[in-house]
Image (spheres, helix red, strand yellow):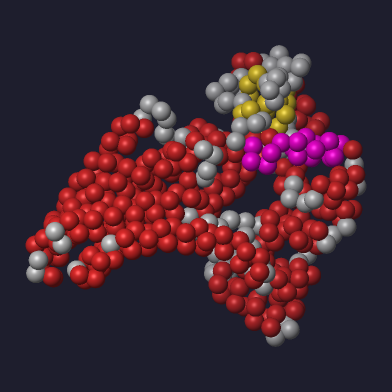
Amino acid sequence: MTDAEQVDAPSLLDRLIDALEEGALDEARTIIAALHPAEIADLLESLPVADRDTVWELIDPDLYSEVLAEVEDSVRTPRMLRMAPATLAAIASTVDDDDAADLLQDLPEDVIDEVLRAMDAQERVRIESILAYDEDTAGGLMNVDVVTIRKDVTIEVVQRYLRRRGEIPEKTNRLYVVDRENRFEGEMRLADVITADPETEVNELLRTETPAIPADLEANEVARLFEQRNLISAPVVDEAGRLIGRITIDDVVDVIRGEAEHSIMSMAGLDEEDDMFAPVLVTSRRRTVWLGVNLATALLASWVIGLFEATIEKVVALAVLMPVVASMGGIAGSQTLTVFIRAMALGQIGSGNVGPLLNKEVLVGLLNSAIWAVVVGLVAHWWFGDPVIGVVVAIALVVNLVVAAFSGALLPIAMRRFGVDPALAGGVVLTTVTDVVGFTTFLGLGTLLLLS
């Protein structure tokens, strides 16, 4: 489609749903036929389960593999489990090896074995070499289809080799140079093969600045390396330095998107792979655990408030102002927590700079708390006509914002050390800390200064 013919996603979705509801399957097929496989995948994820089955039958079978490669695991896996192993093998054979491995890795082991047995031997070996690695490592991301050359040959020899080969893998911008043991030695730009003097030896054009990525390197570290070095592709090597595959930028984009979705969804205790049209009981079960954790922390804060019940009964103004103290502490802590989680994800925090960063955040918290303590204190004094109430809320605000800044910086570091995802649990723990500290300080000072 041209830009002028493109329709925004909501309108497209509405048109498709209307066609399905009216039984206009020819119109629905026309809508789907004009879309890219990734757009079809987005539509499938946006439809209720019953409509997905109808739409799937309207998709060109030649696009099945590309659509499955784009759709979320929670939608893809149930669809693939309905297919025969021979059908899955045929679909996997039409996509790159890394995409084929992605398609298979979430299936049960016995199904994977059946699908692999239905493949030809060469393809089976290639996909098994990827499946041998965890999906969140460089080995799990790589494509084993690479072009290798030796450094002691001329450009003319390389050109003849490529012509005899007939085609090169998609997204190839480098030829990898290996020794007789297949150990990675460097790379040569594909552009140099075209423009260099045919008599020039590969060794003269060899580049070694692109790092060889260990197969067991975590996917988020791979993404960071691509970002820092502005890479389009990079070689993957095993523990002996032997070239076993390559990673291309399209795979890294998927990792970056997945990391972003994980960060957003984890803050609510959700999984980025969850199907938004999953059965009610399944969704309820996944969310109820998180709600239970929040309930426990809320009850803890309520228990603290209950300790000062007599004070609140006598000084109602404290009950009115409590949310101010808790809210300001929560926001201040969340700001610091977000900064630290991002910095940790980018590898910007180490043992050498934790101290200065912690000091900086505490000072920021102290400065901000002093500014807003004066504002809130004056408002409270004007509102309730009691300067002591203004003093109480001002001091409580300073204490809570400083503790919030300190906790927001320290919690993600401590959680990572204990193997807990700070994006998942950091917000809940931080809220508990700021609520408990804020209420205790505020109500404790109120008891001391207003009822003594």
The quadrant the N terminus occupies is bottom right
Residue pictured at 67% horizontal, 73% vertical: 48
Quarter of the view holding residue 272: bottom right
Which residues are drawn in magenta? 122-137
Left or right, 76 with respect to 418, comes to right
Quarter of the image that includes the C terminus: bottom left
- Look at the image and tell me whether residue 267 can be seen: yes
Residue 202 seen anywhere in this rendered image of the structure: no
Q: Is residue 409 above or below residue 449?
A: above
Q: Please tell me whether residue 179 belongs to the stretch shown in magenta.
A: no
Q: Residue furthest bottom?
A: 22
Q: Position of residue 361 (x, y in %)?
A: 29, 41
Q: Between 74 and 417, which is closer to the camera in this rendering? A: 417
Tell me: residue 19, above or below residue 331. Answer: below
* Residue in the foreground of this view, choosing between 180 and 404: 404
Magenta region's main secondary structure?
helix
Picture quadrant of residue 271: bottom right
- Does residue 99 appear to the left or right of 302 in the view shown? right
Between residue 319 and residue 198, name the one nearer to us.
319
